[in-house]
Every structure is written in C-alpha cells, then in structure tokens.
Amino acid sequence: MAILQQLAQALADQTIEIVDLTHTLETRIPVIQLPAEFRQSAPFKIEEISRFDERGPLWYWNNFSCGEHTGTHFDAPIHWITGKDYPDGATDTIAVQKFMAPACVIDVSDRVRDDEDYLLTIADVEQWEAKHGRIPEGSWVLMRTGWSTRQYTDAFLNHKADGGHSPGPDSQLPLWLANERNVIGWGTEPVGTDAGQAHALAKPFPCHHDMHGSNKFGLSSLANLHLLPPTGSVLITPPLKIKQGSGSPCRVLALVEKNARQR
Ligand code: MN
C-alpha cells in the first residue's frame, strides 16, 4: 500500500514522468511491405460513423481497421513459426505481469547515421554493459537509432530494389540476449524488430526467430527513445487482448524518474 501511494504521489508531482513512445495511428502510417509472392498487411483505415449529425446527433465515433503489426506495435511469440506453440504466447494468453518491465536503451544513432543497415552486435552490448552495468533479467533492450524521425516519409521503410533498409540486431545477438541475459524482449524504431535486410543474413530474421522462439516479445516503430535514460525506465506495453492475436498496435508508455532523462 505504501509503495503504491508513493507511486501515485510521484506521478502527481511529476517526480516520475510518463513518456509516450508511440507514433500516432493515421492513414499515412507506413506498413511493412513483403515480397510480392506473399500476402500483404492492409493499411490503417478509419471511417467516420457519425459526428454530431443526422447519422448520430449527440455522438462522434469511427470504425477503424488495420493489420496487427501496424504502427507502434507489440509482437507476440506466436507471430513466428519458432514460437507458434507457446500456450502463453498470444496477445490474450501472455501473463499481464509481463506488460510492465524495465528497459535498457542502447544508443547507436551515430553509427546508424553513417550506415542505415547497421547491425547491433554482442560486442556492442558488452561495451554498453561496461559503462551502464549488466542488463537486468526481464528487461527490454531498446535499440535507439534516431530512425523514428523518418516516420511518415519514404525514408522510414527506405525501400530499394532489394527491399527495405533499416538497422537491427545481427544474427547472433537475439539468441544471446534471450539465453545469456534472459531479457523480456527487443524493441526498435524502424517498422520491424529485425533489420530491413534481415532476410539476407546468415540466420534470416534472427530477432523474430530467436526472441519468439524463446517466448520473448518485440516492440517496433517506437518513438521518443531519446527521452529515456540508458537504464532505470519502466515500460508499459499491453497489446489489445485479441484472441490468439500475433500482436497488436500498442500505446507504449515509459515511466522515467525526473532528471534521469538521457542527454
Ligand atoms: Mn511486428
């Protein structure tokens, strides 16, 4: 009781701030494009039902539709073939305790500025740990790249003749994070948790393959990672409770102690 009262007080006096890591869902939000032989995810669509008019004089509301993996969103383990059999791996079956967890933020914006296909390595994480300490068990690992500033432009999907180009983890990192650090998941700024060219890696789609294969989660299209400290924030990430959902758009929030923001 005392802890919750302290939390409520800290939120009221903004000793703890709430940072929104979510892009706005609107029709121009970019949706991942797969090679033409595969079925595509539908774009975000919104249609007014009524707005204080003859269709409904006192009320305003909309119908909307989109794919589960649209905008800032949560990837559940059953999204990938390696995680398909986890009974607690769908949006409706994941334990709700897992929707609040601490975050570590690894900033490689400078490297991504020079190389838009930059792949984060185990060595990069170990270098980060030498400065900030070992990644605590059950943490999110968030790759900060500055990519979110490209949102709503062609540079976000960054499609070229050979597909999308965006940063992500290399082939080895996701399994290492799952096994050696027991993280809760991996989060990133581009359209998906894996790099744009991840289909061409020695191990294709390593984040999807190994994170979901280890019953761990993904967050993608995150915004405002520059407002988080390297350690010490807590994320709130509940997806919509879709029956056997593989993921869902998600309002991702971070609790951050005042004056802990990254500069
Ligand atoms: Mn996804």
Image (cartoon, rainbow, N blue to C red):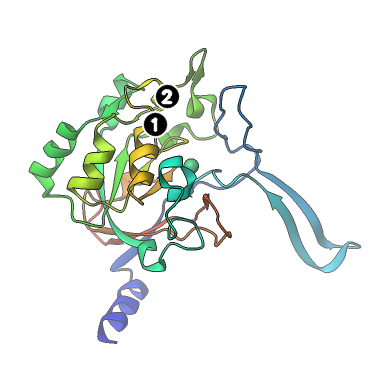
Give the Cα separation between the discs numbered 1 and 2: 6 Å
> Label 1: which residue?
205
> Label 2: which residue?
199
Q: Is residue 207 left or right of residue 178?
A: right
Q: Amino acid at mark 1?
A: Phe
Which of the two residues, 28 or 261, is positioned nearer the viewer here? 28
Q: Secondary structure at mark 2?
A: helix
Quick one: label 1, few (<14), some, or many (20+) residues within 10 Å?
A: many
* Residue at the limit of the structure toward the front, as seen here: 85
Which of the two residues, 157 or 175, is positioned nearer the viewer here? 175
Q: Is mark 1 within 8 Å of ligand 1?
A: no
**Mark 1 and 2 residues: CB-CB less than 8 Å, in contact?**
yes
Where's residue 257, x and y in %? 26, 63
Where's residue 178, x and y in %? 25, 46
Where's residue 73, x and y in %? 49, 48
Quick one: label 2, few (<14), some, or many (20+) residues within 10 Å?
A: few
Which of the two residues, 237 or 35, is positioned nearer the viewer here? 35
x 26%, y 52%: residue: 261
Q: Amino acid at mark 2?
A: His
Relative height, residue 36 to residue 23 (above, below): above
Q: Is residue 38 left or right of residue 218?
A: right
